[in-house]
Amino acid sequence: MRQTAAAQRQSDRRTEILDAAERCFSRSGFHRASMQDICGEAGMSPGNLYRYFPSKEALIAGICERNRADAVASFALVDSAPDFFTGLAGLAQHHLVDRTEAEVGLCAEIMAESRRNPEVAKLYLGIESDIRDRIAAMLKLAADRGEIRNDVDLDAAASVLMALGDGMSWRRSVDPEFQPETALPLILQMVHCLLAKPGDCATPVKETSR
Amino acid sequence: MRQTAAAQRQSDRRTEILDAAERCFSRSGFHRASMQDICGEAGMSPGNLYRYFPSKEALIAGICERNRADAVASFALVDSAPDFFTGLAGLAQHHLVDRTEAEVGLCAEIMAESRRNPEVAKLYLGIESDIRDRIAAMLKLAADRGEIRNDVDLDAAASVLMALGDGMSWRRSVDPEFQPETALPLILQMVHCLLAKPGDCATPVKETSR
DNA sequence: GTTATGAGAATGAACGTTCACTCTAGTATC
DNA sequence: GATACTAGAGTGAACGTTCATTCTCATAAC
């Protein structure tokens, strides 16, 4: 129990450091944020920080892990939704509108980094794979329940949904004028068109300008 | 004419260097590609390279410029298309399927870089703005011609189309298993649903698995 | 007194950039 | 036609800086 208290303190310290690193990374990117910056943000000397994380890579990996946990957890929203389209809307709202600028930025950073850092790529593809499975399961369940049409390739649909999510997310982090809350209804309607049973599609839309 | 020949040689050399830099950047990213790498790829010493470009930043900027020119040029495809949806399909095919891995990767790199490098951000937002204008013009023309419904907010629709493009593009550069040619028909059908006049929407789809 | 916690100067590699210099080819001078 | 001169393309070692990481030493906890 003495040991668990110490371990707890260690773990807390690690979380603090990850928080600081997350702020730095989402502000300046993985490469432009120096360890000195992170030490400053964490109120800690480099030597001490290295007692908790063996390298900068390890910090990046730690942050990816946390991100994965968050992403998977957000699917709890879906499980409690009354039907597929409500669940999807909730997920989209959470993922694309509610998240802070910093969270979106960090996610963009991870995606970009995964293009060249094999370690990050492995972690990121793991997250991706988890999310794809969850989406596929959602679609499968909805199809079984008869909430969506059954002549759509569910795998391809999952890919499309992920691409939609990525696109909105990137637009947010790259274009300061982009308003996710304006675009989201159109997106949802499009998806509804794609997946809903025939006959319930041609709902007129009128949105305010972005 | 002596002078123009020299100027031509200079310009050729600059293009060669940009080509080399583009290869390096799309392979390793802006930050991991060193000037030495680029010099090696260009078959040239650093000192000489610096006679053509004053800094690494200038190389990045030069590449963004070229990218912009390419993007704008690709809209020529649309102008020659018989109708809106055909033009859109051609554009999507060109932008999302036909482009090489290197081109897509470079584009991803520019987007990521624009999040923190103000110089690149300015260039990138310029490109974005150009493209948005072209898309908006396409939509406006289609609406005037009566090819698409007229109760959709065209600005929001342009945003959605750009987000779709970004999403597909990113998926391509990040997920090695992603098959744009499989997802594209679904995307186009969704967009058709969103924009086409009511009544021509609920076409059943059956795609092969990704 | 031993161990955990911390600070911060020191280290060495990598990087963008510069600089003194060479090589090549064209032009003027004799 | 041979020689001297010039411009500019090209070289690559060296410089200053930045950065991740490590080393040394001090303090607090038990």
Image (cartoon, coloured by chain):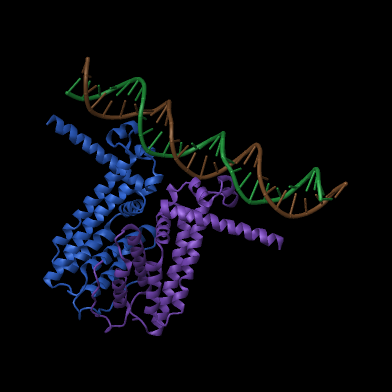
Chain colours: A blue, B purple, C brown, D green
At 14% from the left edge and 33% from the top edge, which residue is drawn? Answer: A4
Q: Is residue A1 left or right of residue A210?
A: left
Left or right of B89 in this view: B64? right
Q: Quadrant of the C terminus of chain A?
A: bottom left
Can you give x and y, in whole percent of width and height, for residue B45 in the image? 56, 46
Q: Is residue B20 left or right of residue A50?
A: right
Rendered position, B137 above or below A120 = below
In the image, B4: left or right of B186?
right
Q: Is residue B81 above or below residue A62?
A: below
> Quadrant of residue B145 in the image?
bottom left
Q: Measuring 22% from the left and 35% from the top, which residue is drawn there?
A: A10
Position above or below: B48 against A151: above
Is there any visible trace of residue A62 in the rendered image?
yes
Camera-side residue: A194 or A129? A129
Q: Nearer the viewer, residue B14 or A93?
A: B14
Instruction: Tell me the quarter of the image containing the N terminus of chain A.
Output: top left
Residue B160 position in % (x across, y down): 34, 69
For residue A206, say whether it is visible: no
x, y percent for residue B68? 48, 64
What percent of the width, then of the height, locates residue A159? 26, 65
Instruction: Tell me if residue B109 comes above or below residue A3 in the rendering.
Output: below
